[in-house]
Image (cartoon, rainbow, N blue to C red):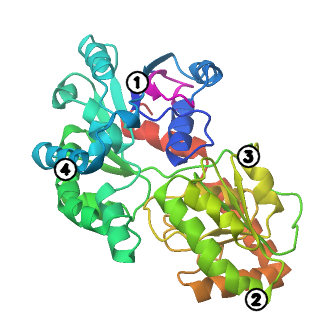
Amino acid sequence: MPMRLLMISATFPYPPTLGGTQVRTFYLLKHLSQRHAVTLVTQTSPEVSEADVVDLRGYVDKLVCFPKPNPADLKRGTMGKVSRFANFLVTGTPPSTTYLMVPAMQAWIEDWVTSGQCDVITCEHSVNEGFVQPSYRQRVGKVVVDIHSSLYGTLLNQLETGTAEKPWRDRLNLGLMRRYEGQYVKKFSDLVITTEEDRRFFEPIAGQTPLHVVPNGVDLEAFPYRNADPGGHSLVFVGAMDYIANVDTAQYLATEILPPLRQRYPEATLYLVGNKPTEAVQALAQYPGVVVTGRVPSVADYLHRATVGVVPMRIGFGIKNKTLEAMAAGVPVVASDRGLEGLAVDQPQRALRANSTAEYVNAIGQLFDDANLRATLSQRGRELIESTFTWDRAGDAYERVIGTI
């Protein structure tokens, strides 16, 4: 039965190549809009072009845009940080959420909901939960939050692995973040996560609220299976290069994994492919064998040219689009437990698992030396994506959550 859906996303989800949030939001709304009237309310930054707005409007019934707040307007220095922490302490809502609460956007959503313009509301990432009032559950059929991953779990993971940018701050925030997640989930009729592993963070706080696993998918046309194995000794890591988990991974690859690998394979090359490389990522280009590309016209082209795809992520929960896309493109993958979260890759073997520098060097070396192993992982990886991780499957699962199929 066709429904009127209101999707809330402070992240402008187009083009769907700039990061995991954009990719997931775009492909879910694209799927839902095939059978339902989708209204998307979102925020635009200076990086969003008019052409992007026009293109995205073609995928929804109605597109409503508000300017994203300017980070430059935030109070700087110690007093600004103290003020934001105090607000978090008192209100229970973290700065990452309050920062996005544009009053005009809040007012528009309130008017849209109270005037009966929608049957279902979805928040496309938990950061958007602030736009949802508890009373909305009495006004519409379902109010769903597509969480993506636990913010508390991410902080805990960073502290446990020693990868937190500011450990003292994150230790202060850890308990507050757990309290925050326990509070906001009460506003929703359904909670959506991407992997079973994230369930352990939300089952204790979900109460009677249904908890659904809806994994990510791959656009198989955008990531076709490669025509041939290029051989050689090249590695590729893909991701938005201004995201802390990807920056940490890029640094780990360039400074810890690649040097010992090049002792065995002097021509080994690492391609760091992704939008918005930070200064820290750009600086990695000075290391022998490291290429920092920035944004590229086709990620699939870089995947097809790589001998091995590497996803040695140490932090960040949730299913990884970068892993799915590499497997879809036919690239044999070496990845960490974090990089392989939500994927059944061990029996039969569809990727190589590694969690230490020595394990990465050995696993990558195996693939460099063994064309048959590369071919096996390539074929099995693609089969897994085709059978389990397409956006049509994910979209159907999401529709079941919101009660339309």
N-terminal-most mark, 3 or 2: 2
Start-end of magenta stretch? 32-47
Q: In the image, is residue 28 part of the stretch drawn in magenta? A: no
Q: Which residue is at a point 34% across and 18% down the rendered structure image?
A: 118
* Residue that badge 3 annotates: 296
Q: Position of residue 370 (x, y in %)?
A: 82, 83
Q: In the image, is residue 41 part of the stretch drawn in magenta? A: yes
Could you tell me which secondary element the residue under label 1 belongs to? strand
Q: CA distance from mark 4 to mark 1?
A: 39 Å
Q: Which residue is at a point 74% across and 43% down the rendered structure image?
A: 221
Tell me the tag on residue 263. Answer: 2
Could you tell me which secondary element the residue under label 3 belongs to? loop
Q: Position of residue 361 (x, y in %)?
A: 67, 85
Q: Is residue 347 visible?
A: no
Mark 1 or mark 3, which is nearer to you? 3
* Residue that badge 4 annotates: 82
- Horizontally, residue 62 falls left or right of residue 188, namely right
Tell me the tag on residue 5. Answer: 1
Could you tell me which secondary element the residue under label 2 belongs to? helix
Say which amino acid is labelled 3.
Val
Q: CA distance from mark 4 to mark 2?
A: 48 Å
Q: Position of residue 328 (x, y in %)?
A: 70, 57
Image quarter for residue 225? Answer: bottom right
Residues marked 1 and 3 touching at CB (< 8 Å):
no
Could you tell me which secondary element the residue under label 4 belongs to? helix
- Horizontally, residue 80 falls left or right of residue 298, namely left
